Image (spheres, rainbow, N blue to C red):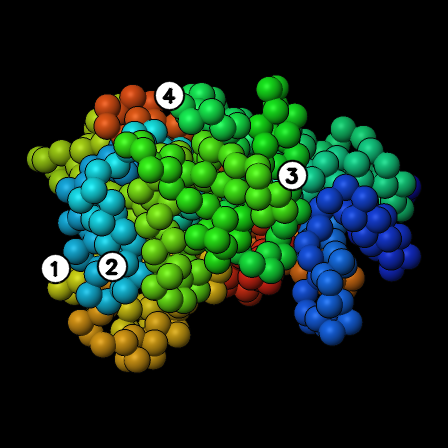
Amino acid sequence: MTSGHDAEPSRQYPPATTPEELDHLVEVIKDWAIGNGLAVRTPPAVISSEADPTRITAVPAPVTLFPTAFPRQAFLQGQKAQNAYNELYAAVSRDENFLADVVKQVIDGDDFVRDLWAVHETVKSEGYTQPLSLGLFRSDYMVHEHKSSESPTAQAKQVEFNTIAASFGGLSVYASRLHNFLAKTEYPLLGQPLAPGTLDLPANNTIEGLAGGIEAASRAYGDSELGHAKCVIFLVQGGERNVFDQRHLEYQISKASPTIPVFRLAFTDIMKHTSIAKSPKRQLLYTLPRNGNRVFEVAVVYMRGGYGPDDYPNQQTWDARCHLERSHAIKCPTVLTQVAGIKKVQQVLATPRPSSEPSILSKFIKDDTPSAIALWNTFTNIYPMDTSDVGLEARKKALDPEQCVDYVLKPQREGGGNNIYGSAIPGFLKTVPEAHWNSYILMELIKAPAENNFILRNGTIEKGRVISELGVYGTCLWNQETGEVIRNEQAGWLLRTKGEESQEGGVAAGYGCMDSVSLT
C-alpha cells in the first residue's frame, strides 16, 4: 500500500478533508462569493429586518464546497434536447385550441390557471398587436440509472419545463467560476490534493446566452414609431432576495452596442409607471420614476414575477397583467406561453404513443424525427388524475399507502414548495374535493443516485449524501402568427443540489443550493 498523496484522491471524491481545511475553504468561499456576486439578500432568519431596515446586507448564496460528480452522458443529453424543447413549446403556445382543451381539464380546480386564460381571452377579443414572443426557458432533469442492460446507463429524465421566470442563470455561472477558482487555487493544496486538471468542469455561458435572447428580441422589435428611446423592463417581485441573479443579466445587456437601457419595475407598480400609447399598435411607455420627463418605449418585458397566485392578490394586479398583455411590447413570456408551461401540458405531451396512431407530441414535433426521439428519451411516466381509465388507475396508485411512495403529486404551479411527495399524498387528497383532483398530475419519482458533498448555507456546513437537478436553458424568439422561429438556441446550464432526504429543490425557497458539475 502506497503512502502520500498520489493514489487516495482518485479513490475518494470529494477528498477527505480535515476540520482545518474545511474552515479554510469556507473562508475562501465566503469572500469569493461576496466579491463576485454569488450572493442573495440576507434572509430574515439570519439578520432581522429591524437590524437591516434599508436592506443593505447580502450573504453568499448556498453553494457546495466541491462540484458534484455528474454523468457526462446525461449532461450532454439534456443539452442536445434543448433546441427541440424550444421548438416544441413555441409550437404549443401557438396552438390555442390545444391549450384551451388542456385548460378546460384543470380549470374547475385551479383558479389561477382560469384567471390567466381569462387575460388571454380579454386581449384576444380586442386583438393582439405584437406577433413576436420570447421564451427564456429552462428544462429541469434528474439522472435516472437505466439498468435493463448489462452496463447501466445514466439518462436525463425531465422533472419539469419552465416557461416563466426561469431563475439562477446568473448565479449558475458564478457557481461554476467559484469551483474553477477553487480547482486551481485550493483543491491542489489539500492533504489529499486534487491536482489541477483532475476535474472535468464544463464551460458555463448562461449569462451571455440568456442576455443574448433579450437583446435579440429588442432588436427584432424595431425602431420606435413614436420617437422614443427603447428599453427593456425586468418585471420583478417586491423585496426580491435573489436580486443579484437578475442583476448579472442586466449588467450583461448593458454591454450591448448600441446601449439597451434596462429598468427594474415591481409587479405592483406596473400601472403607476407605464401607460399604453393611444395608437393602433398600443405601444407600452415607461416613465422614469426619478425623472418624469424621460419616457421610453418598452421593447421587451422580461417577467421575473407574475408566475404564481401570490403575485395577484387583487383585481388591480390582474388588470396590470392584462395591461401588459394588450401592449405592443414583446413579452417574455406571453400569457399563452406561461399557460403552455403548466404541468398538465407536460403530462399530455408525454402521453405514450398508441401503437397504430400518431402521438399527441406529433401535433408539434413529427414522430420518429431526431427531435422527437430526443424528447421521448427525456420523458418519464406522468399520469392524469382525471376520470379516464388511465386517470382512475393513477388515483388508485396515489391513494394506496404502498404504491404512493414512488410518486409525486403536482399542481399547476411554478416555484418550490408546491408538490406533495410519497406517503403524504393520500392524506393530502382527502383534503381536496374529488372534483378538483383533475387539476393535479401524478409523476413517477425519478430516483437519482446520491453523491457525497458539503453544502455551505448561511455560514454553516452541511455534510452528507446529496442529489442534483440539472437545468438546461434555452432562448427562443418566434412569430406567433406565422410560426417563423427567429432564434432557437441552447443557452447554458444550472446545477442545483440538495440533501438526499430533501424533497424540494428550490434554492430561493430555501431547499437546495447552487452547484456545478464535475463530469464523470
Q: Which of label 3 and label 1 is nearer to you?
A: 3
Instruction: Give the side of residue 140 with respect to residue 461, left or right.
Output: left
**In the drawing, does residue 141 fall left or right of residue 38?**
left
Mark 4 or mark 1, which is nearer the start of the sequence?
1
Say which residue label 3 marks.
Answer: 248
Q: Which residue is located at x 30 percent, y 26 percent?
A: 479
Please tell me which of labels 2 and 4 falls first in the chain.
Answer: 2
Q: CA distance from mark 2 to mark 1?
A: 22 Å
- Please state which of residues 13 and 178 is positioned toward the viewer in this rendering: 178
Mark yes or no: residue 491 visible: no
Left/right placement of residue 390 relative to residue 266 reads: left
Question: Disc 2 versus disc 4: distance between alpha carbons?
Answer: 30 Å
Question: Where's residue 340, x and y in %?
Answer: 30, 45
Residue linked to disc 4: 486
Relative to 380, is 231 on the left or the right? right
User: Quadrant where the C terminus lies?
Assistant: top right
Q: Tell which circle, 3 or 4, labels the residue nearer the N-terminal end.
A: 3
- Residue 461 occupies which quadrant of the picture? bottom right
Closer to the N terminus: mark 2 or mark 1? 2
Return the x and y of residue 36 as percentages of the image width and height: 77, 41
